[in-house]
Image (spheres, rainbow, N blue to C red):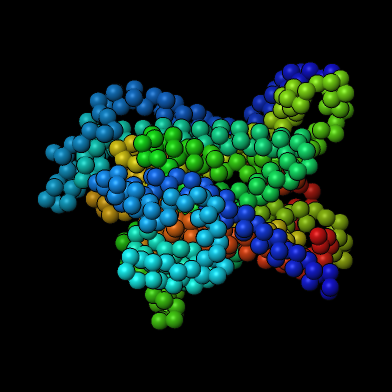
Amino acid sequence: MTDPAVPAASGARQFWRRLRTQRAALVAAGVVALLVLVALAAPLLTAVEGQDPTTYHPSLVDSARGGVPIGSFGGASADHWFGVEPQTGRDLFARLVYGARVSLGVALAATVVQVAIGITLGVAAALGKRWVDQLLSRFTDIIVAMPLMIMSLALLAIVPASFPRPVLVALVIGLIGWGNIARIVRAQTLTLKELDHVSAARLSGWGTWSIARRELLPGIAAPVITYAALLVPSNITVEAALSFLGVGVKPPTPSWGQMLTAADVWYQAAPQYLLLPAGALFVTVLALTVLGDGIRTALDPRAASRLRIGTGRRRESKAPGGGTA
Amino acid sequence: MNGFTGFVLRRAVGAGVTLLAISVIVYVVFYATPGNVAQITCGPRCSPEQVHQVARQLNLDDPLFVRFGHFLQGLVAGQDYSTGTSVQHCSAPCLGLSYQSDQQVMQLIWAKLPVSLSLVAGAMVLWLILGVGTGMLSAWRRGRFSERVLTGVTLAGTATPVFVIGLILMIVVCGELRLLPFPQYVALTDDPEQWAWNLLLPWLSLALIEAAAFARLTRASMLETLAEDHIRTFRAYGVGERSIVGRHALRGAFAPVIALNANNVGSAIGGAVLTETLFGLPGIGQELVHAVNVVDLPVVVGMVLVIGFFVVLANAVADVLYAVADRRVVLT
């Protein structure tokens, strides 16, 4: 009987070695780590600043001019590092760092839900009876076909308003976006099922559940991690988009997408009100995408070099026959 | 050719079955919460009796499958609705009446559809040109500095949400440089020139984001083709590099680009919702956001089904195109 712990451990070491050789992925990992740290330490950071994300400061905005922040650069000062929000006077730094919590938290939670559903249904389809497979696969086809943005937007119409909004948004995104994971898991499980160690386990009378857990899960880990790593930035974008439309995370909870809803009106008086959340979104999604590409290259170098998707692999681009133009 | 016709027919039937399944799932999911809907339609100050009356008026008390039966019947044969005093006939395909305005959902969608179609169709032309062009260029300039710049720009494109790029474009082009007026929808049939000018920025915003994926794919599949033996043979025969990249390698990218384009119709419609909201274009996206905010379920369900129709249609057309483009594809 193969012990899954042994190949998994050496696989992990190999993975780190391959990830370390990619400079872009390392930088991205550093940025992501920093963002996670900021999100976790949001209460601490705002305590240092001495502000919180929800208190109104009417005295800091000029109500005669429609609520423009008083002072240069949108009211930035020693008290309010990034200035204040137009109209309400809420502290922008506090809203930005708390926004990181919402963005990353919702995206990660949604990814966990997507991966959990995807693995369950994918394995069930691959190991189940023919009709189970047919049913689940057709259902997956439909889920994949429906646009994630539209479906989550529409679903948010019927969810109970009493629920905490960020949890709800994460759940809705998670409940819809699992289709591709399920497909990948099903395909991988079908391949693994035919391998000797799985047949051996079956012949020695293991139950389906133990086979799935001990023989199959280690085998599907790599493709699932690869795809999940790219789901995180996509989920961040969807959350930001929903909040931008006013149906996602609602005030007073801060979210980057929601901050951008009114930003275009204020760009002249308070340009950072637009640029900060936009920049935060851009850097976060970019870093996560580059890291995801790096993880893919590290987990499956052959596929990555075949597609030449790796971001820091200059050697690839000088492959034989290249650069003759 | 008979095999091909049969393939198209089978594909059409498959698309129809998928659509039916989608409508069952969507209907069940959205109408499984009846009490809530009546309460919200009635307003927060309604008494329980009034809520109950609204629920009865909207037939929310009937079992779900009965209501779905009515819905399907309306879709196929049309339906009559009594709106208190008069009877309104809703002809097939009928998606029901809006809870808010008693307007027919299908009419509502028909009125808004030209805006969204203009947006997505125009943007699609742009993203195909931009994406395939950029991908070709970076495959051609492989290993050069310019290729790395293009790769960087493409990566930035995949990381930028459409509403961020739209916001920045709008502020820079319309606000600061005043090159274009802030977009306002003008119907194509009214004034084609104004139609195009006003849609230019929304098109660009949507296309720039979508083009990134096409650039990556085109580059990857062209590089894959360039590594194949028949290309080496062309080179050995002295075929020019421009012709090899521009004609033979590009052919290899054709099928994957078609497939991606079909897959991206869904995400593009999602992007169109954001673009419409951002630029204030009165399309179905804006209407959908409004319907979600006021919990107008017939409108939400109708929109989701119409969007699902377009996605399924795009995939079916892509499959057929795929088979036409590449005769090696096995027709099943």
User: In the rendered image, which quarter contains the N terminus of chain B?
Assistant: bottom right
Q: What residue do we see at 25% from left, 25% from top?
A: A50
The image position of residue A255, as x and y in percent, is 37, 40
The picture places residue B96, in percent across and down from the top left corner, at 46, 63
Identify the image quadrant of residue B237.
bottom right
x and y percent of residue A164 in the render? Answer: 38, 34
- In terms of depth relative to the viewer, which is nearer, B48 or A81? B48
Seen in the picture, residue A225 relative to B11 is either above or below; the reply is above
Q: Check the image and report above or below for B301 versus A87.
A: below
Depth check, front residue: A268 or A247: A247
Task: Examine the image and state in which quarter residue A239 appears.
Answer: top left
Is residue B244 found left or right of B169 in the rendered image?
Answer: right
Residue sitting at x 76%, y 36%: A128
- Taking the image as drawn, is residue B156 in sight? no
Answer left or right for B91 relative to A75: right
- Which of the 4 image quarters holds residue A217? top right
